[in-house]
Image (cartoon, rainbow, N blue to C red):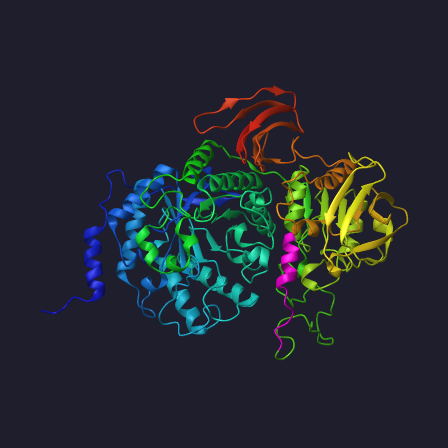
Amino acid sequence: MRRLSWFAVVWCSLVVLLPSPAASQGPLPQVRLSGNYFLRNGRPFIPAGVNWVPAKAAMQWPMEWDAASVEADFRKMRELGVNTVRLDMVWAWFEPRPGDYNPAAFAQLDALIKLARRFEIYLQPSLFIGNEVGEAIWDVPWRNGRHPHADPEMLRLETNLAAEFGRRYANETAIQSWDLTDEPPFWNAGKTTDAMAINWTRLIAGAIRRSDTLHPIVVGTDAQDIGHGPFRPDNILGEVDFLSVHPYPVYNPELFPDPLLAERTTYAAAFQAALSGGAGKPVMVQEMGASSAQQTPERIARYLRANLYSALGGGANGFLLWCFTDAAPQTYQRIPYRRAPHETQFGLTTWDGNDRPAGTEFRRFSRRLDRLDLTGVEPAHAEAGIMVPFEWSKPYGELRGLGLPQYGGVPYVSDQEPGSVAGQDGADYGELSADLAATWLNSFVLARRAGLRASFPRESSDWSRLPMLLLPSPLTSSKRNLLHVHTTFWQRAKDYVRGGGALYVSLNGESAIPEMEELFGARLADRIPAHDLRIKVVAPFGDLKPGDEFAFASGGATGDWGALLEPRDGQVIATDQSGHPALIAHTLGKGKVLTCAYPIEKYLSRVPAAFDDGDSTHRVYRALAEWAGVEPLFRSDRAEVEAAALTGPGRGYVVLTNHSDAAQSVTVTALKALRSVQLVQPEGDSPLELHGKVFAIRMAPFGGEIVEYRELPQ
């Protein structure tokens, strides 16, 4: 008797094991993007769910398909409140040999689609996984070291497979979106350049679009936004429909020198969503989590809760947590779990299906999202913009619009551009870019503590309508082109301030600002070696009073030094311990400028849990806002409690997040007169007492609340 092939055996087994359709099974409503949010049945819809890796089979689930176990997972996910699940299409399973597609793999995806319809859970398939679960790089056996982002044959095969997915599922409404790949760049294949990342995304997205114009497209990026990776949002923006972030602060100690439960870490999701979103498209929090092998389940639940509400208030349009379940004990015997203990316990549930505290929190959050009516509602406009330099957002070496003759002229090559000098890789921006990202983060937290909604406009964009601009050092420096604004920025800044804008800068020993006297009311005289710093207020400014002090610990490197300022028309607001000007305020035209002589945001980036012990640096930002007349739509009377608005005509929501480990009684003041406010609860809404523009609410430690408001008619 002729033996059945391996694929035939799998296929026959699969047919037997696939779940039978439920009687009520039918197509799910189509999901599409409209503005910041997705729409379903014409109403805004926020994907809320998990990344799915089964407890027992883990990443071997396609090869160890267990229909009953998979169905049980979907049933449990639905009970948790999951409406969207992200899952990996294991490339080697779908294409075991070049150009040879496995029918069993597509049959499994068809079975998952049937489950999605049955349990009303949308799918977000990730097509070309690389890094997934710890150290693991899930490869194809026939790659033979070829670069997946550059090798012509690899690109041909990848685009063919993407086109096959698009052809087969072009009209399948159970698919929420296509994720082109997980956390690129991946594989041990050499460096991926900006051009490779752009071309790869363009090719793969284009291959899907040959047949499929229904589904939004995203690339599941990790820290590309904060690390200046080639798949950063500005590079792939034109090829995708929305962006994604995977905030894991415990794995970024350069930015987050903090425990899991610290104020700075609970801003991680909102910060990355704002930074990526500044490129110009909506952002989904596509992964986020922590391991109970490293922190207690109760602390993880609080960490997730604060990040979820903060990112929701910041405008994130979806939340897919990592991950659905813990790994089963027998899975510990396998790599990568065998070599990555922390990866075993990221679940919202235990391996045998019991809720973790994080699962309980997610269920409550998901039920609250279901009660929101976001029709006509969008994230509120920012009051403050933290600048992203041109070279950070654009492929390096793109010289269009940089002042050289359009045709002809002498060739120009930067000695900092990779590959410009034979045998030289170019400048190493690793540590320096971490400094910039950390400074951005601390400026973002300070702005939020001051009650200001902060965005990240790109230097080349139109930022003239923002009420305030924040340029913390090294944005004001002259070292490494990637990290600072162009010389021409300061000419635009003068027009911005004259027209009524408010500008804040902090300087360091490497700052260089041409003709700065007119704009800042001061000149750069020299640089000041800095170690410990004490700033004392000497003149009233906003709510700052003479005698108020701020203390910082600085490093000894020149990038940590301060700037010796020579006041001209500006007013000295504060001095350092040696009597040198530390804060100078200046008026130009209709606008205001505040200059700090020291890189205080950088100093904070090196202090563990810097915001957890009563740090008051945010008062500098708040004082400038008060002086310039910049008022947020909603303001909390506690710096630890963030108030972020989602606004529509005459109504909207205030999302409140307590970023501290203490319960807070908070008073919230609105800019406009309100008619009513009510607390959105999973079990139903409840009215809050309103006194004109003011209401009060009690916040749990690291808690989140959503308040619906309605304005009085104008």
At x 39% / y 72%, what residue is drawn? 143
Q: Nearer the viewer, residue 219 or 477?
A: 477
Give residue 459's quadrant in the image. Answer: bottom right
Q: Quadrant of residue 669?
A: top right
Q: Percent x, y for residue 673?
A: 65, 24
Q: Is residue 382 magenta?
A: no
Q: Is residue 610 left or right of residue 13?
A: right
Q: Outermost residue, bottom direction? A: 422
Which residue is located at x 50 percent, y 47 percent?
A: 284
How far from the left and from the top, in percent, is residue 553?
72, 50
On the image, the x and y values in percent for residue 427 come to 65, 69
Membership of 428 in magenta stretch:
yes
Q: Main secondary structure of the magenta part?
A: helix
| Front residue of 171 and 423 | 423
Region rendered in magenta: 424-438
Residue at the image position 56 percent from the left and 49 percent from the top: 281
Residue 234, can we see it? Answer: no
Residue 404 appears in view: yes
Against 489, residue 551 (above or below) is above
Image quadrant containing the N terminus: bottom left
Q: Position of residue 639 (x, y in %)?
A: 65, 35
